[in-house]
Image: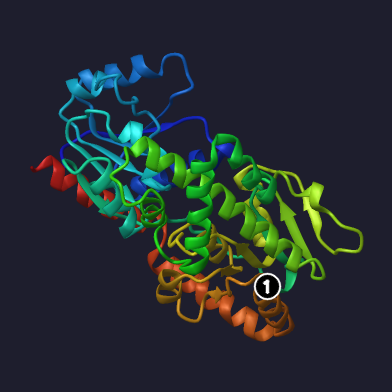
Amino acid sequence: MADGFILLFKGHSQYDSVNTMVDQLARALERLGAPTVILDTRADDCVAAAAGLSQRRRVRLFLSLNGFGIPAAGQGAGFYGESEAPMLIYFVDHPAYHHPRLRTPLPRLVATFPTAHHVDFCRRFIRDDIAIHHLPHATAAVEAAPWEGRDLPLFLSASLMADPEPFRAQWRQHGAAVAARLNAMIEAHDAAPTRPLHEIARAALDGAEAPIEVLASYMITADTYLRSRIKLALAKALAHLPLTLCGEGWARHAEPGQRAAFLPAMPVADTIEAMRRSKIVLNPLPPYYESHERPLQAMANGAVAANGPNAALAAAFPGGFLGLSADPGEAAAALETALADEAGLQATAEAGHAACLAGHLWDHRAAEILRLAGSLAGA
């Protein structure tokens, strides 16, 4: 690649999650010899600063995490159109959440997504005229805390997005047809939990080539319900175990006699510190989530990552990952058994930690990003 630096962006980031990733990726790029500059889109002078850097041709790559710094469709290319530098967007979520920005007419654009079916979805339903690649989540390398000092047996950090059944009941307010399609999606998911959600949504829409705006709205609504349902069901099944819950919406579900400790939502740095104190970090997500940062963060911090059925994680971390049943009761029983086997649990944690450091750090993703950007620059 040519001389110059890589320009990254920060923005509004819940719990500072994506902004923390920006910092971690920037440090990884620097370690690989690629200078970086980070601009904050919340600053009044951000656009002027980016435009000035672009016009002086000091930027060799614009790098956006999850669309930070990217104008929405209809706003034009802005200063990106005046630069010869490529733009790479590293998405950490499903493209259904980002379709407006994906349609922004930026020159020399490439996008990456955490799973292969995300890539397929983007090409089929949003746009297929740009380079789109599969690039999974990553985490930062840390020095794992000693196993003996871990005082949080089970840790779950995730806000409860909705009370699932009241949320589902509200679908009737949007009409019988809408509610029927959404309920059909839930039934289809329960019958085939690993099936990509967009396939389920299209089937519920009678296979019609619905506009992305319609398809995305069904997917996001169903996903909100499914994520909330699985989190709440697992938390209730673990009521008799020493579970620590962190995030919004949990305290209202506290019941007399349960052992769970409730912590408020907190910045990702504090969540990471809690992982350093944890033995098992839970990541209850529907099985169509094949890639997520939480298991990687858990393993990097020396804890055992526990997830629902996930073939991709099981293949990437053999012996270093605790796969759980989709059934909450069966998952709770497996976790209780795991906690009783201290030596086995520690061995799983060590294997996961080693595998994570070997191939799933921001340094690994940064190297791939530089390779992709280099191919764009030479195109």
Residue drawn at the location 55% of the way across and 35% of the way down: 174
Q: Which residue is mark 1?
A: 147
Quadrant the N terminus occupies = top left
Please state if 220 lies on the left or on the right of 267 as rendered: left
Element marked by disc 1? helix
Quadrant of the snapshot with the C terminus: top left
Residue plotted at (37% across, 55% down): 203
On the image, the x and y values in percent for residue 337 come to 70, 83
Disc tally is 1
Between residues 83 and 311, which one lies in front from this camera angle?
A: 311
Q: Residue 172: image x %, image y %? A: 60, 40
Q: Nearer the viewer, residue 264 or 361?
A: 264
Q: Is residue 43 visible?
A: yes
* Amino acid bearing label 1: Trp
* Residue positioned 49% across, 59% down in the render: 141
Q: Quadrant of residue 57?
A: top left
Image position of 56 with respect to 132: above or below? above
Image height of 295 relative to 337, above or below:
above
Quadrant in the picture for residue 237: bottom right
**Viewer can see residue 277:** no
